Amino acid sequence: MQIGVVGKPNVGKSTFFSACTLAKAEIAAYPFTTIEANRGVSYIRSRCPHVDKGVPCNPKNSRCEAGVRLVPVEIIDVAGLVPDAHAGRGLGNKFLDDLSAADALIHIVDSSGATDMEGNLGKPGDHDPVAEVAFLRDEMALWVRDIIKRDWHRISRQIDLEGQKVDKAMAERLSGIKVTERDVNAALRALSLDPMTSKWDDDDLLAISRKIRETSKPMVIVANKADIAPKDNIERLMALKGEIVVTASAEYELALHRADAAGLIRYLPGASSFQVLRPECLKPAQVKALETVKRYLDTYGSTGVEQSLEHVVFKLLDRITVYPVEDEHKWSDKDGNVLPDAHLVKRGSTARDLAFRVHTEIGEGFIRAINARTNRVMGADHVLEDGDVVKIVSHR
């Protein structure tokens, strides 16, 4: 699973990336700090079943802290997007190419309004962050449309004259950016278009492209820099219809991680508070900074960084966490590791789907599965639930 971090320059994308991955990314107050895409691993939270089993777990593909399983997801931080990026302006072509493999997007918006559309710094309140939302969606839709338009005249004539399926033809054209026939079909069903595809004009293709982007690369808006944002900006962003908006301060999240890594505080990603461990080691400036962060957490409940990731994984991509094991009694693998692996699977996935995810040969040789919590047999089409612990029986 890959999640792209997008937005115009200088809105805090690299800070957000560093905060959720702890990877080093260049952070500076000028546009196009990021040129090459940064890639890293972040973690989303899921309740670990070892709490129910009453024995310690031994994670292999994830982490567990205080009964919370931290499941890895890949994060891509790309170059900032400026107007007309779809036409190659700025680093537009590279930005969009780097996003091709993303399953979903996190749109970082400067909720303080301190940066213009080019990413140049001003003062909080100088610019309208709501305009950033429409701007980026327009650029993404134009990018998709430009891919469809390549040789569209010939393709549309073949569709009309030879009876080809338009959703299949479009999906083939867009396969490089992970668009499926299902995505195209959903987009076409939502629109009232002329049945003759050769009559579709640029506006029709743009309308289709908007819908395709919505289904193939769903997006969460992160109202970043909420710690310095005018209240009105936050309220207008939160009031956007049809959007998931999370208030955030990536800078505060990064500061908390660094203080935790230094052993000064105890902080878990996404937590609503932190514990000071060594107050005697804190300098006056650090004490003041932590007090400021605490007031923010008291107001918003979290820094918003972890919450935005979880909105993407659990709401937009509709994933659940399941745990395959080899011993249904001990909940372990053949080496005795308890709950070694956590997998994020699409809600509605079956026992057979999980078998294929573990290994193709196991899926092909699927016989049955066993719910380790209840010891009941699960057939191939049994739909999995969040937190299931599953033994797969296969003849391979």
Image (tube, grey):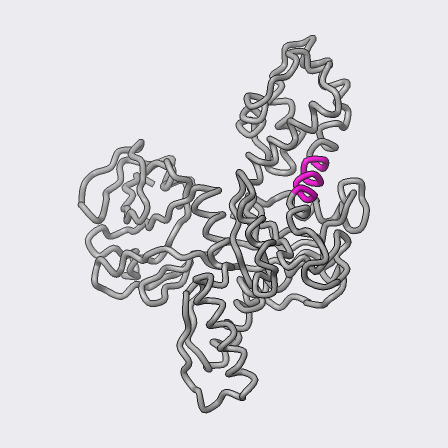
Residue 216's spot in the image, x, y percent?
A: 57, 36
Residue at 81% over, 46% down = 89
Residue 273's spot in the image, x, y percent?
A: 41, 70
Residue 344's spot in the image, x, y percent?
A: 41, 48
User: Along the line of sight, which residue is nearer the eye, 332 or 273?
Assistant: 273
Quarter-of-image position of residue 181 = top right
Q: Is residue 155 visible?
A: yes
Residue at 31% over, 36% down = 383
As drawn, 207 above or below 119: above
User: Along the line of sight, which residue is nearer the eye, 288 or 195?
Assistant: 288
What is the tally of numbered marks visible in this picture? 0
Q: Residue furthest front?
A: 232
Residue 96's spot in the image, x, y percent?
A: 70, 45
Q: Is residue 140 magenta?
A: yes
Q: Quadrant of the C terminus?
A: top left
Report the magenta stretch's main SS: helix
Q: Residue furthest bottom?
A: 280
User: Along the line of sight, which residue is nearer the eye, 151 or 247?
Assistant: 247
Quarter-of-image position of residue 233 = bottom right
User: Along the line of sight, which residue is nearer the eye, 38 or 249?
Assistant: 249
Magenta-drawn segment: 134-143
Q: Residue furthest top?
A: 161
Q: Is residue 18 magenta?
A: no
Q: Is residue 359 visible?
A: no
Residue at 63% over, 33% down = 175
Would you say 95 lies left or right of 247 here?
right
